[in-house]
């Protein structure tokens, strides 16, 4: 059931109009407010609609995903908990359906002034599963939260993340599901005055994965770093959509996503929307997307969008590039006696290494790099790589 507060949010969004501005896009907790997508809509034109119909229609066949954690700070609550549904509203029909579907949520609260690390594991068995995660970083707290997604089934998920004044939060969302799985995740972030967030998305598997991340600032002086890494294999569709809404002044955002694609019909989509409102003076923002195409038959779509309503900013820009291997890098490695297949893997490792290093948390960096190497089967080639380098020397 939609609460009164949520109904007000719907009415406000509907009153914004239907113009071309990113700010005009409808947000609502009610799926009935969104038409069933046809694929012609801007927010759906890259998505394989025929493959995800179960995420776009009402269903009574959903079950709660298996969620586990060792953190003593995690609570399991009903959907009527007042701490839920307060971080923005879903931006599309799938997000609204995910909100309507769950019966219980997991809330992780980092107490004010404390430091904490937590891992939440979400496993989706066969069938349609639901999950809802709420992360609250109270004033002056500092935490790293890793959310791991696994399983062979479908998962429709909502995440609400809020960072209170002067708090510092790192959230890592890892999608490492089986080849048959499909995963839709609607992640909404809210940053208070002087708060910092590092939001990291790593996607390593799944038939269709679509992660939408929306971030808004509730006060001045907020800082956000959004990082993403993905490896898209044959036949897989991986879609990452980011919206950074700058409304208060003196805020900073950096978005960096990198992906590698290999195999026939591998398809990666990255959409980066940044809106700088009329009152967002002294904004400093930049977004970057890089795609490395490893084989023929793979395709990457990259669309950065920047909308500016004030001229009083520190800086605003974006860059996007999709290409194949740097032949000079390959030539150098092969000239050192490293076989071509291993050289290509080393180039991929280097391609991601710079991004992983930006995370700034050693344990998370190690985890993510290990996962990327496993996906590329680098672990099994470690001895070959070492011997090749030694022979070249």
Image (tube, rainbow, N blue to C red):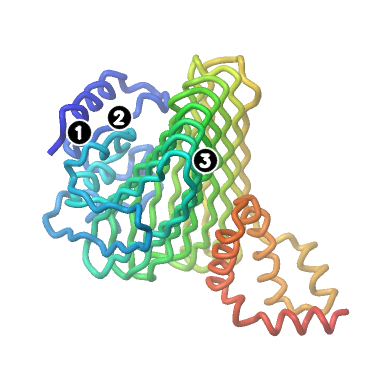
Number of numbered markers: 3
Identify the element where label 1 is drawn: helix
Image coords of residue 383 (percent x, y): 69, 84
Residue 340, placed above or below residue 229: below
**Disc on the earlier residue, 1 or 3:** 1
**Disc on the earlier residue, 2 or 1:** 2
Kindly check if marks 2 and 1 are in contact, taking CB atoms under 8 A apart as contact.
yes
User: Mark 1, mark 3: which one is toward the viewer?
Assistant: 3
Kindly check if marks 1 and 3 are in contact, taking CB atoms under 8 A apart as contact.
no
Identify the element where label 3 is drawn: strand
Name the residue located 76 percent from the left edge and 84 percent from the top edge: 387
**Extreme-right residue of the structure:** 393
Q: Which quadrant of the figure contains the C terminus?
A: bottom right
- The label shown at residue 168 is 3
Identify the element where label 2 is drawn: loop
- The label shown at residue 125 is none
Image coords of residue 329 (percent x, y): 78, 63
Residue at image mark 2 = 26
Q: Which quadrant of the figure contains the N terminus?
A: top left
User: Mark 3, mark 2: which one is toward the viewer?
Assistant: 3
Residue 371, placed above or below residue 43: below
Badge 3: how crowded within 10 Å, few (<14), some, or many (20+)?
A: many
Residue at image mark 1 = 33
């Amino acid at each position: 059931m939609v609460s009164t507060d949520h109904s007000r949010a719907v009415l406000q969004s509907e009153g914004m109009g239907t113009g071309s501005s990113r700010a005009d896009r409808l947000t609502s907790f009610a799926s009935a407010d969104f038409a069933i997508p046809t694929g012609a809509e801007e927010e759906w034109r890259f998505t394989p609609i025929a493959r995800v119909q179960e995420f776009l229609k009402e269903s009574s066949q959903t079950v709660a995903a298996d969620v586990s954690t060792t953190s003593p700070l995690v609570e399991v609550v009903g959907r009527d908990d007042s701490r839920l549904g307060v971080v923005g509203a879903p931006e599309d029909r799938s997000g609204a359906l995910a909100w309507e579907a769950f019966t219980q949520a997991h809330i992780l609260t980092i107490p004010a002034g404390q430091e904490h690390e937590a891992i939440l594991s979400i496993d989706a068995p066969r069938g349609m599963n639901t999950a809802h995660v709420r992360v609250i970083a109270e004033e002056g707290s500092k935490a790293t939260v890793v959310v791991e997604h696994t399983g062979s089934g479908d998962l429709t998920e909502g995440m609400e993340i809020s960072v209170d004044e002067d708090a510092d939060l790192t959230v890592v969302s890892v999608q490492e599901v089986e080849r048959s799985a499909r995963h839709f995740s609607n992640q909404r972030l809210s940053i208070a005055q002087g708060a910092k967030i590092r939001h990291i998305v790593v996607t390593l598997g799944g038939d269709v994965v679509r992660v939408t991340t929306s971030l808004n600032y509730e006060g001045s002086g907020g800082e956000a770093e959004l990082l993403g890494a993905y490896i898209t294999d044959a036949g897989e569709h991986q879609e990452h959509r980011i919206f950074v809404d700058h409304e208060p002044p003196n805020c900073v955002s950096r978005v960096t996503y990198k992906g590698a694609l290999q195999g026939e019909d591998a398809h990666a989509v990255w959409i980066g929307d940044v809106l700088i409102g009329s009152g967002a003076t002294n904004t400093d923002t930049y977004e970057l997307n890089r795609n490395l195409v490893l084989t023929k038959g793979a395709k990457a779509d990259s669309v950065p969008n920047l909308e500016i309503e004030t001229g009083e900013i520190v800086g605003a820009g974006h860059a996007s590039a999709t290409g194949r291997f740097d032949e000079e890098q390959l030539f150098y490695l092969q000239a050192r006696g490293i076989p071509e297949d291993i050289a290509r893997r080393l180039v991929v490792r280097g391609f991601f290494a710079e991004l992983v290093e930006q995370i700034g948390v050693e344990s998370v960096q190690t985890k993510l790099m290990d996962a990327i190497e496993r996906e590329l089967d680098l672990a099994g080639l470690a001895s070959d790589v070492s011997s090749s380098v030694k022979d070249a020397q």
